[in-house]
Amino acid sequence: MQHVPRSSKSIGHCILTLFVIVLSGANYSNAFDYFREKPSYIKSCKIYEPEFTKCSTESIQLLMNEISKGIPELKGVVKSLDPFILDDIDFKQSNTEAANLEANLKKLTATGLSKLQIKESRVSKKDFSWLTKILIPKLRLEGQYKLNGRVLVLSLQGEGHMFIELEDLTVLMRTKTKLIEKDDLTFYNITELRAEIEIGNLRTQFDDLFGGTNKEIEKSTNESFNKNWREFFEALRPLITETVERILFDLLSNVFLALPAKYLVEDIPTPAQLYNNKT
């Protein structure tokens, strides 16, 4: 075996390190950070004008329409909207009348977000937080599940493929934001997102319930869930709500860090103006 002299190793290491630094710098300089100019599909609004809420609602809808089509600059920054890939979800609901449940959802995809409708977009003049009313005609969640616990009067245990379809999903989204500054521009940084949801119908299918050993019981259980979907939805409401919150946060947080806030709200203050003026 040929041994490389120590000095040669050091020189080689330095050259490799320099190459990585140069290459990283090149990649960084070419990476998309944020929009330097306002995109043509963005409608700007002024918060102190009477028709601001109407203008803002139209503006956010136009933005969502473009995201649905795919915005080239945001490729790799924002996930594809349809299907939307979610991270794994671990969920635990304490013993309540409706459910006592532990759930793990993996390889989750959501479809139907491209049809998302912004019904109203309100922005607080006090802290620039948002109150947004959203309608999704049909949202389908599909992936692998693992359940253990009780839903309604049924003891559940199983793992396998599942889907949950929510029809006429209405979302009241409350979003807290922190204005931040970058390159003398103001951006929205989403710090918290909470959702209240209602639906018009629910359809579910959980394969391999009870270990998949009794297909007749599995079939009748799924039929019971769909027949009594209102009660089943109430039992699963915390899990579904958390999933919807995760989808919206993952989507919106990256979008608004790439879009200077003044493109949407022309007269938005700087962080210094908003926070330093507060007593």
Image (tube, grey):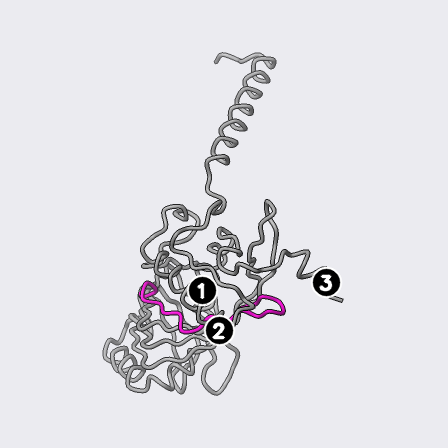
Q: Secondary structure at mark 3?
A: loop
Checking the image for residue 57, the label placed there is none
Q: Amino acid at mark 3?
A: Asn
Give the mark nearer the N terminus: 3 vs 1.
1
Q: Is residue 170 left or right of residue 269?
A: left
Q: Secondary structure at mark 1?
A: helix
- Quadrant of residue 103 in the image? bottom left
Q: Residues within 10 Å of mark 3 (few under 14, many from 20)?
A: few
Rendered view: 44 above or below 148: above
- Residue matched to label 3: 277
Which is nearer the eye, 244 or 131?
Answer: 131
Q: Position of residue 169 (x, y in %)?
A: 36, 76
Q: Is residue 147 left or right of residue 49?
A: left
Q: Residues within 10 Å of mark 1 (few under 14, many from 20)?
A: some
Q: Amino acid at mark 2?
A: Ala
- Residue matched to label 2: 195
**Residue at point 45%, 82% (across, down):** 99
The stretch in magenta equals 112-131
| Disc 2 to disc 1: CB gap under 8 Å | yes
| Disc 3 to disc 1: CB gap under 8 Å | no
Report how far apart the C-alphas of labels 2 and 1 lie in the structure: 9 Å
Give the mark nearer the N terminus: 2 vs 3.
2
Q: Is residue 164 left or right of residue 39?
A: left
- Quadrant of residue 203 in the image? bottom left
- Residue matched to label 1: 248
Give the mark nearer the N terminus: 2 vs 1.
2
126 is within the stretch colored magenta: yes
